[in-house]
Image (cartoon, grey):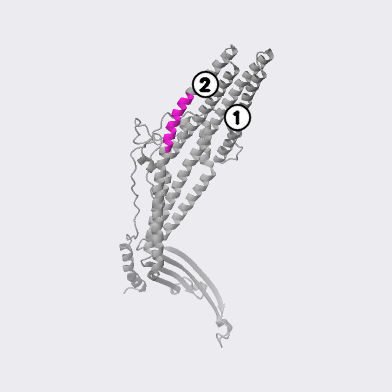
């Protein structure tokens, strides 16, 4: 004959079989990536450029600029930027919550122990002596509780946590793209300002020479005080540009230092040494919009949040069905510490609990409606993120291409204005023209050279903006981001 424990096990066997049979039953919708109409190519791309079908695995686009200072700054930003540290902490938190959610699918074990010594009063036990009214009690046990996830409530919760973790990882990737782009653009702005400062100071030197010549002619009686005043006024106007440019350059040095996790003044000595703008690529191959959707981490984050919201519909739906909990206890109780864990002090309990909140149907349906609304909102956010990514990329490509065209025209204008200023000086020295022609030519030269330095800075920044929109590097240097897998 089977003993009591064998009979109890046999009685629970059908429940275990039922749990295994229904383990695959998961209520609620499964996440499916929405399909959106995506154009085959960018409208702002030159049709003669054929996109590369499979970019090479290298995202460190800033190395192509061959600027050791820039490479150092980007490496420092990726290592020490505090916004990145905050995003990393958020990812670590989401990952920890995911690990905790996975334990919901496993039995919960707890251990307990108790020792007590009590005495009843004489009124409670009349006629009983004091020693007999003293009672000791000792117990120890292990409790087991396990929710039988028959309808997928726990599995959907784990699925939502997994998607939240993937979204946090994608957020970290998006912030890395933003921090790198911000660092590189600030560096480009700094080098552009330093070039504009060089242009202003060089033109001021030329204008000082003009003023010196005018003063010499005035001393010789061949020029007037009016000529000297005009030349002096133009020199002072040029010199007035320098302090504002110097202030902007210092502000950018502060910005770069903070981006790299340093105090604002820590990089002044290193960055205040002038250097030219790094060379930028002659053309950019952005790939296709389809590549972009699989590469941008902000799109991945939006999709994972949609996935999490969809899974939470399943969590809310599962509450419409009964929740089964299997519990057990094995332990020992005795009135003497020495008898604890002896055979006759054994205790045990096996129980099946059923919790069905069907009477609270109104509140449950309200939660389901809220989960549906959240998922609809996340779907709209996902679609909007894609549209904004396409818009941002199209805009960056157009700006980059047009700024290169502008650069070509201003380069020629700078050459021509420099030649014109030199000829005006020669003509003035020969007495063939007046001072006004020289001053006008020098003013035009300053404007053209300053405009050229500004447009080259803008072109460099537009190139970096293309990198940012593509979320990596030049498409022939960065791999396509694979679909987000379960973390």
Of the numbered discs in the image, which one, if any, rests on residue 241? Answer: 1
Say which residue appears at 47% left-offset and 73% top-offset: 333
387, above or below 28, in the image: above
Say which residue appears at 30% left-offset and 63% top-offset: 21
- Indicate the quadrant where residue 196 lies: top right
Q: Residues within 10 Å of mark 2 (few under 14, many from 20)?
A: many
Q: Residue 462: x percent and y percent? A: 46, 34
In the figure, is residue 300 to the left or right of 18? right
Direction right: furthest residue: 219
Give the magenta range. 395-411
Tell me if I can see residue 308 in this picture. Answer: no
Q: Residue 317: x percent and y percent? A: 37, 62
Say which residue appears at 49% left-offset and 30% top-offset: 455
The residue that mark 2 highlights is 417
In the figure, is residue 40 to the left or right of 218? left
Please say whether residue 407 is one of the residues in the magenta stretch: yes
């Amino acid at each position: 004959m089977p003993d009591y424990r064998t009979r109890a096990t046999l009685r629970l066997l059908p429940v275990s079989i039922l749990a295994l049979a229904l383990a695959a039953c998961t209520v609620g919708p499964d996440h499916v990536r929405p399909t959106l109409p995506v154009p085959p190519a960018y409208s702002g791309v030159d049709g003669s450029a054929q996109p590369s079908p499979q970019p090479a695995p290298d995202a460190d686009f800033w190395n192509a600029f061959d600027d050791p200072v820039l490479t150092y700054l980007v490496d420092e930003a990726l290592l020490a930027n505090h916004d990145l540290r905050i995003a990393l902490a958020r990812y670590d938190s989401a990952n920890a919550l995911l690990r905790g959610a996975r334990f919901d699918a496993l039995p919960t074990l707890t251990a307990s122990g108790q020792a007590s010594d009590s005495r009843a009063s004489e009124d409670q036990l009349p006629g009983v002596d004091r020693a007999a009214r003293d009672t000791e009690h000792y117990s120890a046990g292990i409790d087991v509780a396990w929710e039988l996830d028959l309808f997928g409530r726990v599995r959907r919760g784990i699925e939502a946590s997994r998607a939240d973790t993937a979204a946090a990882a994608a957020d970290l990737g998006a912030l890395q793209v933003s921090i790198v782009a911000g660092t590189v653009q600030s560096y480009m702005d700094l080098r552009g300002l330093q070039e504009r400062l060089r242009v202003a100071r060089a033109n001021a030197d030329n204008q000082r020479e003009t003023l010196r010549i005018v003063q010499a002619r005035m001393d010789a009686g061949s020029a007037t005080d009016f000529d000297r005043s005009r030349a002096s006024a133009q020199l002072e106007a040029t010199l007035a540009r320098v302090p504002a440019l110097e202030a902007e350059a210092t502000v950018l040095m502060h910005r770069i230092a903070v981006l790299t996790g340093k105090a604002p003044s820590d990089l002044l000595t290193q960055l205040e040494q002038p250097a030219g703008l790094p060379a930028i690529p002659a053309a950019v191959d952005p790939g296709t919009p389809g590549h972009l959707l699989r590469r941008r981490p902000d799109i991945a984050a939006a999709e994972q949040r949609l996935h999490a919201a969809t899974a939470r519909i399943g969590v809310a739906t599962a509450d419409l069905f009964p929740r089964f909990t299997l519990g057990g206890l094995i332990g020992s109780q005795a009135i003497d510490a020495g008898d604890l864990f002896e055979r006759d002090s054994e205790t045990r309990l096996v129980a099946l609990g059923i919790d069905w909140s069907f009477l609270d149907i109104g509140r449950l349906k309200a939660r389901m409606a809220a989960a549906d609304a959240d998922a609809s909102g996340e779907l709209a956010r996902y679609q909007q993120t894609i549209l904004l990514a396409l818009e941002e990329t199209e805009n960056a490509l157009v700006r980059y291409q047009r700024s290169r065209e502008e650069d070509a025209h201003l380069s020629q204008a700078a050459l021509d204005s420099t030649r014109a200023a030199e000829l005006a000086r020669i003509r003035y020295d020969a007495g063939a023209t007046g001072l006004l022609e020289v001053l006008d030519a020098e003013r035009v030269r300053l404007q053209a050279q300053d405009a050229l330095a500004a447009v080259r800075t803008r072109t460099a920044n537009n190139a970096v903006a293309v990198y940012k929109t593509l979320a990596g590097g030049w498409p022939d240097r960065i791999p396509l981001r694979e679909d987000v897998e379960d973390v």
